Image: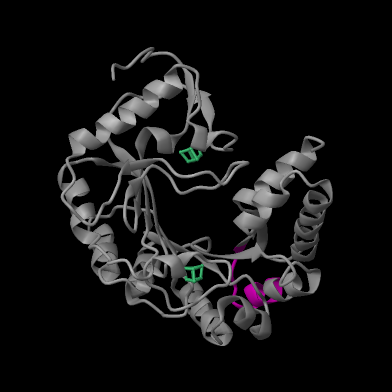
Amino acid sequence: MENTNSNSEYVSCNIIEHGFDAQFDSINLCCRTSKENNTNEVVLIPNYNGEKIDWEKFFQNTDNLRDYQKKGKTIPQCKGCIYLEKKQWDDEHYINTININNWIKCNASCIYCDRKEYKHIKEYKLYPLIKSLIKNNYLRMPVDITIAGGEPTVTSDFDKTLKLFIKTNISPVRVLTNAIKYNKYIEIGLKKGLVNILVSTDSGTRATFKKIKLTDKHNQVWKNIAKYVKVQKANTLVKTKYIILPYINDNKEEINEFLIQNINAKVKTCYLDIEVGWFCSESTNKIFLERMYDLYSYALEKARDTELQVLPFDRMQLVINKINNNL
Ligand code: SF4
Ligand code: SF4
């Protein structure tokens, strides 16, 4: 499709322009759920199982999406997303935002996770895909790379892939790990300041951890978090997250325990988020929104006068926006 208005400003986001989301059986545009509806993702290459990618063909797809945005429309899957912004975008073909979401393997069984549905699928190798992007000069700094789950550290070529990013100085690479398994390449990346990690413990006590993750690894996880904190080059590289779930951890006592664990492990930044399905079903419910806002305000107040920074993650940010705009 021919590009239109290439020099004018239009509403888009960096992922529409330069995103790449490697899912377990397709290459998608984006995996973020920073929007009102939990709609289906935009699939760029369906039925993907590790085949060599024709990058020119790949970029034709993103050109089509750009053209759609240039016409003043919004891709249906992106409607209401907080990352949309109006500005002048370049028209070039490159990737600067990679998400890797190989849902197939994990060493936990979180009750809110859909991973169980995918574990029968054959895992493809990630390393050749990343190598091809680098070799063809389609990966451009500054980058935003996220290696997510399942659990990255138990996938077959995670070590090799992270080593490649570290060796080529491509950073920052964000790894979403559950920290059940300590990984020496994460440690190397943290020491060099090229890697950062986000660990969702969703709890502050052993009992709640077990209830959510269905594995009794609370102590091991916080021990590993503290170990990662000790080696990190800058004190913002190790972060944690608490996803609020209905009837399980949606209370101030558990949030307080989570804050204490963070302070003990010397973590400097933690996030609060809301479970995606719950948020989508309640996003217009005033009582729900005010309750979530109250939990967030409580965490902020509790962390005040400590070195721990509490920040809102995607859905919590949407709640704050709604409350600040009088719903
Ligand atoms: S869902 Fe949001 S972040 Fe993802 S591509 Fe659409 S606008 Fe961008
Ligand atoms: S650690 Fe992540 S991938 Fe594994 S079960 Fe929990 S949410 Fe799912």
Q: Which residue is drawn at 74% across and 40% down?
A: 322
Give the left or right position of residue 13, taking residue 156 as reference. right
Task: Pick the residue in front: 216 or 280.
Answer: 280
Q: Where is residue 320 in the image (x, y as percent from the top left)?
A: 73, 45
In the displayed structure, 101 sits above or below 158; it is: above
Magenta span contains residue 262? yes
Q: Position of residue 210 (x, y in %)?
A: 61, 83
Count the marks: 0
Q: Residue at x 35, y 64 (%)?
A: 192
Q: Residue at x 47, y 17 (%)?
A: 9
Magenta range is: 259-269
In the displayed structure, 293 sits above or below 136; it is: below
In the displayed structure, 139 sits above or below 306; it is: above
Residue 2 visible in the picture:
yes
Give the left or right position of residue 62, taking residue 315 as reference. left
Q: Where is residue 155 in the image (x, y as percent from the top left)?
A: 32, 71
Q: Quadrant of residue 324?
A: top right
Task: Pick the residue in front: 220 or 262.
Answer: 220
Task: Pick the residue in front: 111 or 257.
Answer: 111
Q: In which quarter of the image is the N terminus?
A: top left
Q: Where is residue 209 in the image (x, y as percent from the top left)?
A: 62, 79
Q: Quadrant of the C terminus?
A: top right
Magenta span contains residue 211? no
Task: Pick the residue in front: 281 or 80.
Answer: 281
Q: Which residue is drawn at 16% across and 42% down?
A: 136
In the displayed structure, 286 sits above or below 81; it is: below
Residue 88 visible in the picture:
no
Q: Quadrant of residue 41?
A: top left
Picture colour scheme: one colour
Q: In which quarter of the image is residue 219?
A: bottom right
